[in-house]
Amino acid sequence: MKLFYLGLLIVIMLVMICINMSRVEGFDYEGRRDDQRGFLKETDKYWGSRLFPQVVKGIDKESKFLELSKDKTKLNKISPTGAVDKTQLAKKIEKCDLINTTGKCDEIETNECGYCWDTDKIIYGDANGPSTDVCSKKNWISPGPNTSYYCKKKKEQEICKKMTDCGDTAGDRSICAWCPLKGTGVVKRLKPGPEGGYVAKYPEDKCDWKSQLVGEFGKCKDLKTKNPSDLPNNKWHDRDGKYWTCEVYGRNNKSGCRAWGNGYIYQNLTGNKACCACGGGTKQIDFKDNLISPADCSRFKQMFPCVGPTMMDGPHTSECLQSLWKKAGCSGDLKTRVSDRTDYLNWNTHSYSAAQDNMKKSIYEIALNGTDYTKASQRYKQCFNKDVNSCENRFKPRPNSCAQKIYDSAGCSADGKLNPKNTLSWPDGYISNTWKSGQQGSWSINTYKSKLYDIKRQMQAGLLNPKTNFDKTINTSMMCNGKMPDIPWDKPCWRDFTIIMSTIPGVTENPTNLNLSFNKAQSSFKSLLTVGGRGSWKNDFVWVGNYEITKAKYDGKYFPFWNFIREGRNYWNNNWGIFKSKLLTVPSVSSGTPSVNSKWGGWSNPWWLKRPKGQGDCDNDNDCGPGLKCSQNPKKLPGVVDAGDIYPNRWGAGRDFCYDPNDTAFSGGGDMLSFLDRSQFDNLIQTSTSSSTANSKGHFLKVGTKKYLSKQAFMNENFPYWLFLRTASVN
């Protein structure tokens, strides 16, 4: 029984051993030999890498381990790198690392190294990737004939990317030239051919900035002659004279280019060389090729400041915008001329050519051709730093600033109603819509000036002779000076005014309310107090009620009493007969000697026959009636109307007639009133013994014991006809 259990135990132990052996490290002795060898190989590779000297001196974290001391009291640091022999693989890895350090891409191919474009590292590896680093599959250049090329390209490109500006080509950057289109350095190569010049060494670095130029930058310009020509600015023409210009060559689908383009040389230039139309001219792009060498940097920047990575979409440098500003036709510093951020936002979000077009159209062209003065004046100031002439004919309507300039030059006052500063209030009591329209452009500038000067002249003439038309003098003075002129007459008191006006038929006085009513007067009076328009001085003195004038209205300083006095005067001047009839009702007043027709009685009249006034023949005063005289050889006689009898005889001698010497004083009048000396009228006017004085001043003429009032004296503006009428009504 014991042997049975012993045997069973042995069998179980054998089974356990077999099971345990199959689980050790995941391998079995037979079926997993290859896996075991692979594991050992990887382990060897790992530890082999650990056997390399420290990558960076003094730093050994990548190869340090911890080991428990024999007494199990502490952890000791150990480094197994030093004692292990380097494998062949390790040597290759180390060699690639060394090449990477030196950067010698030419040694890559012979040392089975690859190149990682991501990290710019030379690393040992194979087609699947680097052995000791990480690199994206698409950017891993496995060992092979092209590895060295890509390595060199990458390293050279990285060197050129370090260029800070066009001239930064010192040291290792001597392999570079500047690409203005990208704003960075590019690996260069010399372009084959006689012209030379540098182009990009690598195709992906292509820098074709010339093809990007548009507008003024890339515009072809005809060549000019070096010596003076027959045309301004040395424009080219062929040897046959100034007519044959590039413009002529380019007509009719460039027929001139085809016919004469290679001949008719003038100053060493043919049409095909000089003219853009013929394929010649210049775009002023005389750089040898697309990459800019240090010697050309300054000149390039000056000529093409906008060429750069953002030239087609912005933003643009201040130098670029300044260049565009000048090419657009404007002057000065853009930054000081234009401050509106909206403009800059527009320019810096569009291509340089669009920015230039905007400057030219929205600023330059509006400054020169805009018809809206407000916009044009702003743009003109920005573009040229000058004030635009506001009187240019292009501005519709004519700006107030132009009208103001013309108004001020006319010499009118700032307070004048015509001052353009008052334009918004027109039309009014002084200025019509016609004037407003004329000022704003319907009149030419010369016409507007002329009308201003005419108003001023009328004002000045009116101020010198205000009585001629005082209402007009008021208006012109207000229009030009803004002031009411002094009244040239003494204003009658209210009582005198009522007396004067009451002599007019249809004018009645109401002493109770101190009103004068013109309701029944003639229409000429009713038109004197009307609304004069908005703002007119006349509006303070309009009729009250039914054509009535109150004392309160009359007492206003500029109540137009002079117009009423004038109309009253006109009425009586036209009614001398009525005036005489009213005065002849007074016993002390009689009619003057009337004029008579001439009458010829023959050459021989009885001596006793006393000839009456106007009759002939007489030989002396004794032949005439009492108070009459005989006129010898007259051609005309005072108080005598020629009926055909007063004329010289055949011997040239005139006929003789009797006449009243008193008629001589009245220039042949007779239509007069005679007043007895010391009558009720004596003291109403002055008396003169001179007929001319009496007639010109409205005085009595005294002849003998009588005083006479002629029609001429009666019509004098100072003659107080109302006092005569009032005296006559009383007496």
Image (tube, grey):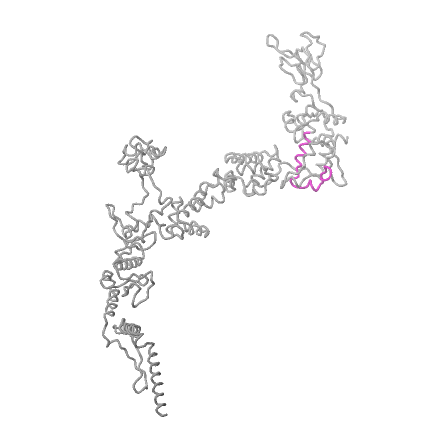
Relative horizontal placement of residue 341, taking residue 527 as reference (left or right): left
Q: Is residue 527 above or below residue 594?
A: below
Image position, residue 681 (x, y; %) = 72, 30
Q: Is residue 356 above or below residue 94?
A: above
Image position, residue 397 (x, y; %) = 52, 40
Image position, residue 395 (x, y; %) = 49, 40
Q: Is residue 480 found inside the magenta-colored segment of the image?
A: no
Q: Quadrant of residue 242?
A: top left
One can see residue 648 in this view? yes
**What quarter of the picture does the C terminus occupy?**
top right
Q: Residue at x 28, y 79 (%)?
A: 78
Q: Residue at x 31, y 33 (%)?
A: 258
Instruction: Please tell me how many numbered marks the rendered image carries.
Output: 0
Residues drawn in magenta:
544-570
Nearer to me, 111 or 329: 111
Q: Is residue 4 above or below residue 481?
A: below
Nearer to me, 261 or 371: 261
Image position, residue 1 (x, y; %) = 37, 92
Relative horizontal placement of residue 519, taking residue 182 as reference (left or right): right
Nearer to me, 606 or 692: 692
Q: Quadrant of residue 602?
A: top right
